[in-house]
Image (spheres, rainbow, N blue to C red):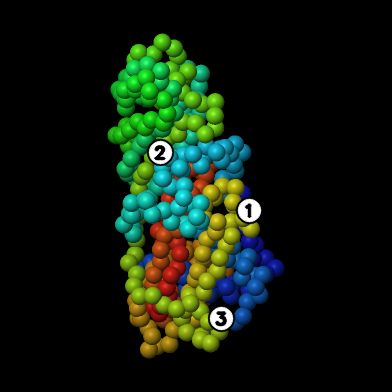
């Protein structure tokens, strides 16, 4: 479980930092800003607070109450092979936190790519443990099953949902030289599956022309040949347009600026479930907003409610002065394991502050 940083015994520096963070933690429709001029903070208190905020932001945006406990990790060779097959591997191993081959979504849409590895049964059934998020409408863009098959004669492979009326989800004819990786589209059946509460997807394979059990055609003895399911989806979320860029903070100015801070996932023990990137650039806004800068470049709402709730919980007064707030943000790309050991790639909107301005 993610740790919680207690206010007891260290209220003053944390409360002060919470005030600073309200410049990044506005709630829509409730303008107002505490004093933008902050006294110096102890580095240890600042680090502890920012690390905790980073944890809570990521968990909240991934709809997780706590960090996943990876008790049965997927073999790395299976992960590497799946990423290589999807042409994602190079971009992620570069550690750039960005996958250029992905289709860009609009700023108010959060995109997902889920890679779920199958539990195979002797009968040839494939079982996938998928994760549903309550209260979110998921639109399935693509659903593909990847199988490594050994074909020594002309056969036809058909895919069904186990336990349901026999409706073919996908099929493919293989020749005698058809051994290797094969993909089967599962649309639109997967859209219907995600609209129900069931989290376990069981697929049945049937073979026309086979002289043996269907399971004998699948190459599952090697971790690198483990069957996997790829689902690309998007979730519609409200977004906010932002404007003009501003400068990073330096020691020669007290005006509104962006302060940079980097959280390394290995340092906080999260590298076992976050595959890429290696860390999170948790920037925030701070500095003075004189009256002549008010309204430049415009009010920018922020999703950082974690810190705002901390301010309210400690009865810290909020005034009506102009505030230094984020005006330009970008997505954080994550490749991570969910509690069911599915590998998920998502772009979380508005997570990295690029610019600040006065409201």
Residue visible at 34% across and 72% down in the picture: 243
Q: Which residue is mark 2?
A: 230
Q: Residues within 10 Å of mark 1 (few under 14, many from 20)?
A: few
Residue visible at 57% across and 37% down in the picture: 75
Q: Which residue is mark 3?
A: 38
Mark 3: secondary structure: loop
Residue 114 position within the rendered picture, expressed as x and y whole percent measured from the top left = 43, 42
As drawn, is 188 to the left or to the right of 212?
A: left
Q: Residues within 10 Å of mark 2 (few under 14, many from 20)?
A: many
Residue 87 position within the rendered picture, expressed as x and y whole percent measured from the top left = 41, 45
Q: Which residue is mark 1?
A: 269
Q: Which label number is shown at residue 25? A: none
User: Which of these two is toward me, 325 or 233?
Assistant: 233
Residue visible at 63% across and 61% down in the picture: 5
User: Which of these two is toward me, 265 or 179?
Assistant: 179
Mark 1: secondary structure: loop
Q: Is residue 53 above or below residue 250?
A: above
The quarter of the rendered structure image containing the C terminus is bottom left
Residue visible at 45% across and 20% down in the picture: 217
For the residues labelled 2 and 1, the Cα–Cα distance comes to 27 Å
For the residues labelled 3 and 2, the Cα–Cα distance comes to 48 Å
Report the mark closest to the observer, 2 or 1: 2
């Amino acid at each position: 479980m993610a740790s919680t940083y207690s206010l007891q015994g260290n209220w003053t520096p944390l409360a002060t930092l919470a005030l600073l963070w309200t410049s990044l933690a506005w709630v829509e429709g409730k303008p107002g800003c505490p004093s933008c001029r902050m006294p110096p903070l102890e580095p240890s208190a600042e680090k502890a607070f920012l690390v905790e905020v980073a944890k809570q932001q990521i968990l909240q945006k991934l709809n997780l109450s706590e960090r996943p406990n990876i008790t049965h990790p997927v073999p790395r060779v299976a992960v590497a092979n799946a990423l290589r097959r999807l042409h994602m591997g190079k971009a992620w191993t570069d550690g750039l936190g960005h996958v250029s081959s992905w289709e860009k979504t609009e700023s108010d849409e959060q995109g997902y790519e889920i890679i779920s590895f199958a539990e195979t049964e002797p009968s040839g059934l494939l079982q996938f443990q998928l994760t549903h998020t309550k209260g979110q409408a998921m639109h399935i863009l693509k659903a593909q099953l990847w199988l490594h098959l050994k074909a020594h004669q002309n056969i036809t492979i058909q895919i069904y949902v186990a336990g349901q009326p026999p409706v073919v989800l996908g099929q493919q004819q293989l020749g005698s030289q058809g051994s290797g990786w094969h993909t089967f589209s599962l649309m639109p059946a997967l859209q219907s599956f995600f609209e129900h509460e069931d989290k376990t997807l069981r697929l049945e394979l049937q073979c026309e022309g086979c002289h043996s059990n269907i399971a004998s055609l699948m190459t599952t003895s090697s971790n690198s040949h483990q069957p996997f399911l790829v689902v690309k989806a998007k979730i519609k979320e409200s977004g906010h347009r932002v404007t003009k860029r501003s400068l990073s903070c330096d020691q020669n100015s007290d005006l509104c600026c962006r302060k940079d801070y980097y959280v390394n996932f290995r340092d906080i023990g999260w590298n076992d479930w976050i595959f890429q990137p290696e860390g999170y650039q948790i920037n925030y806004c701070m500095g003075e907003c004189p009256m002549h800068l008010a309204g430049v470049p415009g009010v920018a709402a922020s999703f950082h409610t974690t810190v705002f709730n901390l301010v309210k919980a400690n009865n810290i007064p909020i005034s009506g002065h102009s505030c230094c707030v984020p005006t330009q943000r970008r997505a954080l790309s994550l490749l991570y394991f969910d509690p069911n050991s599915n590998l998920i790639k998502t772009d979380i909107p508005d997570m990295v502050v690029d610019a600040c301005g006065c409201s």
